[in-house]
Amino acid sequence: MIASRSPVARVAIRAASPLAIMVGVYLLFAGHNQPGGGFAAGLVFGAVLALRTVAGLQRPTHATGLIAGGVAVICATAVLTLIWGDSLLDQQIVEWTVPVLGKVKSGTALPFDIGVTTVVMGLVIALLDGLGAAAMAESPAPTQPPASTQPPASTQTKGEVSS
Amino acid sequence: MIQLVLVAHVVGLVGAAVAGRFTMRAGLLVAAIAPALSFAWAITELVGSGLAGPESPARFEFAWVERLDLRFVFLADSFALLAVAIVSGIGALVFVYASGYFSPTAAAGTRFPVFLLAFSTSMLGLVLAESVWTLFFFWEMTSVTSFLLVGHAHTNTSVQDAARRALMITGGGGLALLAGLLLLARETGSSLLSELEVVSGTSGTVAAILVLVGVATKSAQVPFHVWLPGAMAAPTPVSAYLHSATMVKAGIILMAVTGSAFADSSAWKIVGFTLGSLSMIWGGIGALRHRDAKLILAWGTISQLGLLVTLLALGTGKAVFAAVSIVVAHALFKATLFLVVGEIDIRTGTREIDELGGLYKTMPLATAAAVLAGLSMAGAPPLLGFVAKEAAIEASLELAGTERVLALLVLIGGSVLTVAYTTRFLWTVFGPGPATVVKARRWAMTVPASVLALSGLVGYVLLGSVNDVIIPASTELNADAFKYELIAWPGLKDAFVISMAILVVGIGLGAALSRSQRVAPEPLGASGVDRGLDGVLSVARRATARVQHGSLPVYLAIMALTVSLAATPFFFDVSLDGLVWWDHPLQMMLALALAASAFAGAFVDSRLGAALTLGAVGIAAAGLFVVQGAPDLALTQLLVETIIVVGFVVGLGHLGRSFPRAQVGWQAVRISISVMGGLAVMAGLIATSAHRTASAPIGEIVEQAVDEGGGNNVVNVILTDLRALDTLGEVVVLATVAIGILALARARDGSQDHDSDVEVVT
């Protein structure tokens, strides 16, 4: 509905999302040496997904898989480093030379950060979903009166009743 | 050997789970294998060892929590082996029986076979336990698995109530037992059952009472018996197994193995005797008042368990010997009767004794089994129940003084009632009358019942072998017991005369009562327990409605108020001396902008305006972070602001344009709470920053980050490496929050379909 009501928003979101994803990827990888990191990247990705969903550019993503996957990756990293190194979550650093990029240094912090990213993405999507983002995207076209897009008001406004 | 048996049971669990996927019958038959193997093992050991018991009983232990010295210890002495034989032998037969009980066309089901075998395994662990902790662990396991089994038909609310009641009572008794065992282990200095010493004094008394509460809850002694009749809601194989041979015997076994520690305790004797006698009489009366065949048996079980508790509380060698004999005899005849009643239920469709009759014509095999078992229960020769009851009477005759009179009175009274309800049960169900129409016989049900019924007769014929098993087993519990043996035909002695008199009076009473048509009474205590439980739940619901009424402003007000009250001590600690007002003039400007936006946000009327001012606050805060030299924090802050904007975009669509008007008084309250909260945070920050005692370990962490973490962004290295475990915890918290949000969102979506799931209280 936002999309059909505001083509500007739709076009802008569509144009910005590849850039935003690049920024997110940059944040994820740069995080080890410069500002950024898994949490920030997760926020960016989550915002992109949520905006695209609201604008009707894609179907709602299911947060459950992202959350479960993220936790699984993190736990796997924790246990693997325990086996590989000396203790739980003991960082292991790997360096190797790749043809084009030259020397690449990475560590087990990367999969750990990727797990954080995924969980945060899931959280953002779940949050916005809880606010009704998916319902908003799926709500009927604007040919119908806009009032009908409001979901049952009773549960929504409950938090506002102050007495 | 013990580990092999345990492994066989675990393998059996997996096998039953797999086979149950095809048909429930297959699952049950696969599950029967492990108990059958344990039975074979126990019988071989018992027969091989003879009167002296096994020379070096099998022992197995492994550490559970090493630092707490918590170990699983198992020991297969002759008493344990006898118990294993009962538990596993009846278990295997019950599995076969259950495969006939559930209709052949029943859908595949893994739940029932797996739960039943899990119960059987817990029971095995319990009887083999040598350490009190092992015993307690398996004790609780039996409570949990029996809860699952009683609640098999979990969609039925009365079944739910019954299962919950059983769990509450036996679980509560488990807590008392834990306290008692802790006391016992502390006084004895060892947690091993074989090293238990006589505990005396106050702690002995307290421990005795606590253990007896555990016994009474598990073995359904008055006044804790109310769960047992309700548990008859379980499928009959479960009742036959749990409520005749095994779970209710757990209390008896506990009493038997800990009895040596309380040999001197008069509390043990008096409380145990009182509990047992009351249960014996009240159970017998209950069995005479009920009209449901299964309930008659359940009340009979309460009475029989009362007899066992009484004998074990007396604690003499002969009494313990008699108790062990009755445990064996009771397991055989009561399981048989339950199995027969289940068969009747399946084949006639009713268990009401008023609707049944003349079954001797239509169900001859079942009638024969029931009569054999019933006679054994009544204590008529030539059956195992007779010799066991003789031993009990002799044990009471051996006592002296008041004890003797009391014990004899209770025993005779209880036995007369037993004979009476047995007569009434057999006569009304199988005796003459218009025969009830029955469905076709299912052999899987008939054979186990017949085998168990015949074993009572065979046991009498081969009484020598039975003695070889029971004598060492009871000697294990009480060193005096080796002097006694079961006697097939005692001749015209006092005990024999008494038991014949009991039979005659009991049959007369039973025959008189079988014609009465009084309505069965409501279970007395059960409704009380349920009401108590409902009361607790409704208090909880009301408290939740009061505290969690769903008004966000009130939540926020409570949180802010709590914070400001908690911060009160800081107000006395504020000193403005060490304060640096700003490092950089930009900070002051940003702070002013932040404060201005916050003020504007408080006074703006429209929701969109509030969202914008909040965004301005966030961006100003991010600017402050940048000036302070924390780019990571600023970045995260900005991104969070972005997400919040998206949230507003989505959320504002559901809400009106402007805030609802608040009442003037409430507004004043809100403003004062906000001001207090803000002041409290300020005071807290100033006070804590003035109290730094050591310099921050920043240099150390930076060094570590570059060396070990291999990264230059210290914040990130702390998160992913140095304090990675904290991050792991936070991630789990985030994931939990997200799942919670999803659940809430989903509950709201589905609220029109099932309102009861989401209780929105305003």
Image: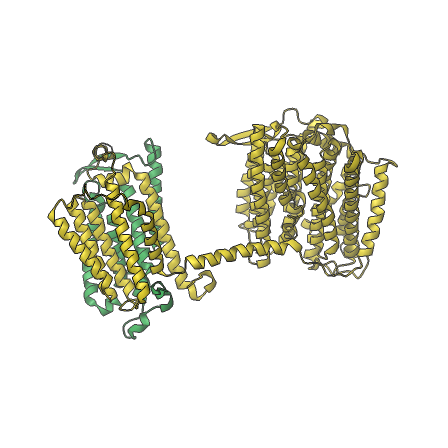
Chain colours: A green, B yellow
Residue B475 versus residue B383 in the image, above or below: above
Residue situated in front as seen by the camera: A104 or A137: A137
Is residue A121 found left or right of B476 in the rendered image?
left
Q: Position of residue B274 (x, y in %)?
A: 70, 42
Q: Residue at x 24, y 69 (%)?
A: A4
Q: Is residue B30 visible?
A: no
Task: Identify the image quadrant of the C terminus of chain A.
Answer: bottom left
Q: Is residue B606 left or right of residue B559?
A: left
Q: Residue at x 25, y 65 (%)?
A: B607
Q: Which picture quadrant has residue B716?
A: top left
Foreground residue among B621 and B144: B621
| Quarter assignment of residue B173 | top right
Looking at this rendering, what residue extends furthest in the right direction?
A: B492
Q: Nearer the viewer, residue B345 or A122?
A: A122
Which x, y percent locates residue B315? 71, 34
- Front-most of residues B112 and B405: B405
Can residue B393 be seen by looking at this rendering? Answer: yes
Position of residue B169 measured from the top left corner of the image (x, y, whole percent): 59, 48
Please report the residue visible at 28 percent of the width from the left and 37 percent of the height from the top: B721
The mark tally for this picture is 0
Q: Quadrant of residue B266?
A: top right
